[in-house]
Structure formats: C-alpha cells, structure tokens
Amino acid sequence: MNIYKIRATIYRDLREFLTNYAVLILLIMPPAMAGLYGMTPRLEGTEIPDIMIFVVLGTALSAMATNIPLMLYAEENEHGTLKLVTHTKSDLMNGLIGRSILTLIVTAVVTVVSLIIIDGLYIVSFQIMIGYTAAAVIFLNLGLWTGLLAKLQSTSTVYGAMILFFLGMTPIVETLNLPAGNIIIAIAGLTPVYQMMAIHNNAGIMPCVILTIWLIATVFLVYIAVLKRTKTL
C-alpha cells in the first residue's frame, strides 16, 4: 500500500467527479428523487412513508457506490488509460483503494443531502448507520467487480442499470400489491436495501447475517476481478 499513490488517485478522481457530466448526473439523481418524493401529497403533520426513504437510500447506493467506479473503470478500460498508470498488482490495488475511499465519502455526503431534502433524517440510528455502511461497501464491491471486468462504456451502462433497478430500487416492489408468498417478494427480501429496512423495523439478527453473506460474496468477486485484471497488465 502506497499512501502517495492512493492520495494521487483521490485527487485525480475528484477532478473527474467535478468535470465528467455522466458522473455529475449520477450525483444529482438521488437528491432529485428525494425532492420529487418530498413533494408527494400527504396529510399535514404526517411523516413521509419509510419505503420512499429507503428507495432514495438504495438509489444513492447504486448510483454513487456502484455506478461511479463502474463507469470510470469501464471508460479507462475502453480507452486503455488504466494500463498507462497501472503496471503492477500493487498499482491496481492502490488505485482501487483511493477510488473506493473517495466514492464512499461522496456516497455518504449525497445520502445525507438526500435525507435532508426528503425530511428522512428521523430514520437514522446507530443500527441503520451500521447497516448502511455494510450496504455501501457491498454496492461499492459490485461497482469495482463489474468495472474491472467491463471493457466498454456501453457494457457498464447495462450493468449499472441492472444493479440500480434490481438491487437499489427493490423496495418499490412493496407498491405492486403482490401476495406475501410471491417469488419476487421473496427474492427482493434478500437484497441489501431490504436488510436495512428490516434493521429499521427491528427484525433481529437475520438482516445482519444476510448482509455479512453479501459482504463476503462481493469481496470474493472483487478479488477474482483483481486477479483477472492483473493478468492483462
């Protein structure tokens, strides 16, 4: 681990965050959704439904933690710029760590801004913060995994959209009025955002177990992607 290379990656990516229009759109997406949900008519004095808040949280996680590193790595792979700055596995790991640190910080900031806009800060608790942190790392790992393997930006768009709709916005299935035993409900109930909802509803230890399984699985996927990408350096 080289702290100077990690810091250089953070500075380089920060400039990219501020100048890349695609990244800027991703940064705006969660607050914009929070604003739309915040304007939903409701009885005076009542709080916004929890499901809307968790949809916003899931959107922030998938848009920020997953799609930003996915998009940046896919762009670097397509144009060959990753090879110009990465010559060894150590270089790849330093870049990955630096990008991950900045992505998680930006994800946290955008999430807080979105919660303020939607008046959803009341859901914040120590348990939710732990669950959200685990979910953020899970979504980050998904972005790193797919980004390291994606060779084209068009491919990254497909991967990112699938993760956004099938993992980030899964609480929307609650609005479909599906029966309790429906397979869609059962599958959605295993996703990271649903575990945060379960933690918020004091569902016991099982959500933490499921999040731990997700963490182990996604860390393994990133490890495999790093090994495969190292062979092409």
Image (cartoon, rainbow, N blue to C red):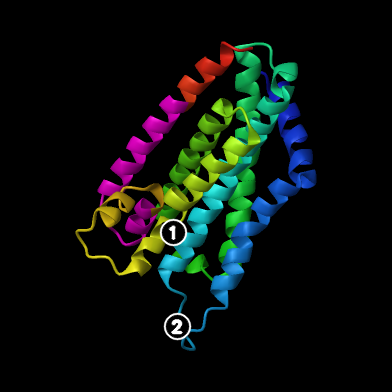
Residue drawn at (40%, 35%) of the image? 215
Q: Which residues are magenta?
A: 194-221
In-image side of 202 versus 142 (left or right): left
Which class describes the residues within 10 Å of circle 2: few (<14), some (14-19), or many (20+)?
A: few
Query: Image point 69% across, 23% down: which residue?
Result: 3
Numbered disc total: 2
Disc number for residue 227: none
Q: Is residue 219 above or below residue 183?
A: above
With 71 as the anchor, is 129 left or right in this view?
A: left
Question: Residue visible at 70% across and 17% down?
Answer: 83
Compared to 117, does 214 lie above or below? above
Q: Quadrant of residue 13?
A: top right
Could you tell me the amino acid type at mark 1?
Ser
Amino acid type, label 2? Thr
Residue identified by numbered label 2: 46
Residue 179 in the image, given as x and y percentages of width and height? 22, 65
**Alpha carbon of mark 2 to alpha carbon of mark 1: how far?**
20 Å
Q: Residue at x 56, y 10 (%)?
A: 231
Dot label at residue 125: 1
